[in-house]
């Protein structure tokens, strides 16, 4: 089987969709398959030494342009950089395919970008295309934004995504939440396949650590902004009942959120920035992730693998089992968020039990298992 990965991202970069591509490619090559990868960039991972076996076509210095465009959002929030980003990648893709004479007999094409142009390109050549959907559709974000202003949603994204969904032969979603949102767009359900993400299950976790019943450490990890539900979390945290506890907000702090944090005037909110997540989570007791919209949050996988119970929202797309590994609440429900956080304060003896459940369950979602599930889909498509 010959597989082509088309990835408008940096393969191997941490916290990036390229990490997933990297694990798939490694497993494919270990099993003796041939892999070509057209991508924005490639970062060699010391644990995945297979680049010499992989046919990589990288954008090189040209790949910095999309990164610059993406960074411009901070200063130009009403500038939609994505059409230009995708157009540049389409041109690069066409250049590689034509001038590098990449006319090979591929059996499977896995596309990691919403590009109707690339999908049509392969289908004209009789190839089926698998499209990756990493997060809830823009149509969901648009409808959500009409109820609660959280972020700028450009209508071009909705049209471009919908065209890609219709054209692709198969769609891969990371959670039941995303799958159902795609189904609401009248996409044929039989071509939507769900594959949960993976997590590092081999790091050491001390499940015997003692819980300080009088001081619970709650933790969040990710981009600290409105979409992640930080406003609601801070509203809840402002209650004096959490006066002896600590809230750790790990990640890049949005400037609006920094103002909000400063306005609370509490010394029990810690913002350490980017951290070694597995190491840092060992200092904490309960993970909290009140996001309004995700695909399937990687941070929750990390928390589970670290032995922490979690409070998550339905749109986080997590694998949490409600009442077993933690709790699932509705996005924006501050009363429920408050009640579940209080529940852990009042039942500190359950923190270790639920954390152990989460750790054990996370072992079912190793990166190796993720790669095998994706490769099984390749076989189904090839047949």
Image: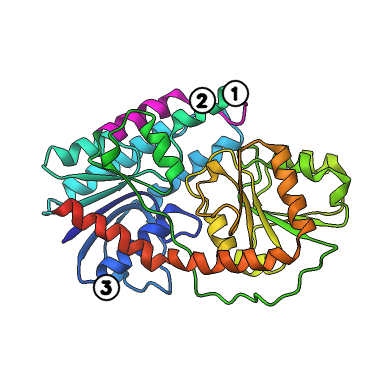
Q: Quadrant of the C terminus?
A: bottom left
Report x, y in % for residue 345. 78, 57
Mark 2 = which residue?
143
Query: Is residue 122 in view from this perspective?
Result: yes
Q: Quadrant location of residue 49? A: bottom left
Report x, y in % for residue 235. 77, 39
Instruction: Give the distance between the C-alpha atoms of the residues marked 1 and 2, in whole angstroms.
Output: 7 Å
Looking at marks 3 and 1 on the same chain, the residue that comes earlier in the sequence is marked by 3
Magenta span dominant secondary structure = helix
Q: Quadrant location of residue 137? A: top left
Bounds of the magenta span?
A: 148-166
**Label 3 residue SS:** helix
User: How many circles with numbers are drawn on the protein?
Assistant: 3
Mark 3 = which residue?
30
Mark 1 = which residue?
147
Q: Name the mark nearer the viewer: 3 or 2.
A: 2
Q: Are marks 1 and 2 in contact (CB under 8 Å)?
A: yes
In this image, 301 relative to 108: left or right?
right
Report x, y in % for residue 21. 36, 58
Name the disc covering residue 67, or none.
none
Query: Is residue 284 in view from this perspective?
Result: no
Q: Residue at x 33, y 28 (%)?
A: 186
Instruction: Give the distance between the C-alpha atoms of the residues marked 3 and 1, in whole angstroms.
Output: 48 Å
**Label 2 residue SS:** helix
């Amino acid at each position: 089987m010959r597989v082509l990965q088309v990835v408008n991202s940096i393969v191997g970069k941490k916290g990036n969709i390229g990490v997933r591509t990297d694990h798939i490619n490694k497993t494919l090559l270990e099993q003796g398959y041939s892999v070509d990868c057209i991508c924005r960039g490639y970062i060699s991972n010391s644990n995945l030494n297979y680049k010499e076996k992989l046919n990589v076509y990288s954008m090189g210095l040209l790949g910095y342009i999309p990164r610059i465009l993406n960074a411009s959002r901070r200063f130009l929030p009403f500038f939609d950089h994505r059409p230009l980003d995708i157009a540049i990648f389409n041109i690069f893709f066409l250049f590689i395919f034509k001038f590098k004479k990449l006319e090979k007999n591929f059996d499977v094409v896995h596309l990691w970008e919403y590009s109707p142009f690339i999908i049509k390109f392969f289908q004209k050549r009789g190839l089926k295309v698998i499209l990756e959907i990493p997060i809830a559709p823009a149509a969901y974000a648009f409808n959500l934004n009409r109820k609660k202003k959280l972020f700028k949603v450009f209508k071009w994204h909705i049209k471009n995504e919908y065209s890609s969904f219709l054209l692709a032969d198969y769609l891969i979603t990371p959670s039941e939440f995303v799958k159902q949102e795609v189904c609401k767009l009248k996409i044929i359900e039989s071509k939507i396949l769900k594959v949960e993400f993976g997590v590092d299950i081999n790091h050491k976790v001390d499940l015997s650590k003692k819980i300080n019943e009088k001081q619970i450490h709650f933790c969040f990890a990710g981009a600290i902004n409105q979409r992640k539900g930080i406003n609601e979390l801070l509203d809840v945290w402002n209650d004096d009942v959490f006066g002896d506890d600590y809230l750790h907000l790990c990640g890049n702090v949005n400037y609006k959120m920094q103002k909000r944090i400063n306005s609370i005037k509490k010394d029990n909110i810690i913002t350490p920035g980017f951290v070694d997540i597995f190491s840092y989570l060992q200092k904490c007791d309960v993970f909290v992730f009140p996001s309004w919209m995700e695909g399937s949050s990687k941070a929750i996988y990390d928390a589970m693998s670290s032995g922490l119970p979690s409070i998550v929202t339905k749109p986080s797309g997590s694998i949490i089992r409600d009442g077993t590994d933690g709790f699932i609440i509705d996005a924006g429900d501050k009363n429920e968020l408050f009640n579940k956080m209080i529940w852990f304060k009042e039942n500190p003896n359950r923190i270790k039990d639920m954390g152990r459940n989460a750790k054990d369950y996370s072992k079912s979602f190793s990166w190796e298992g993720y790669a095998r599930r994706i490769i099984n889909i390749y076989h189904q498509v090839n047949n």
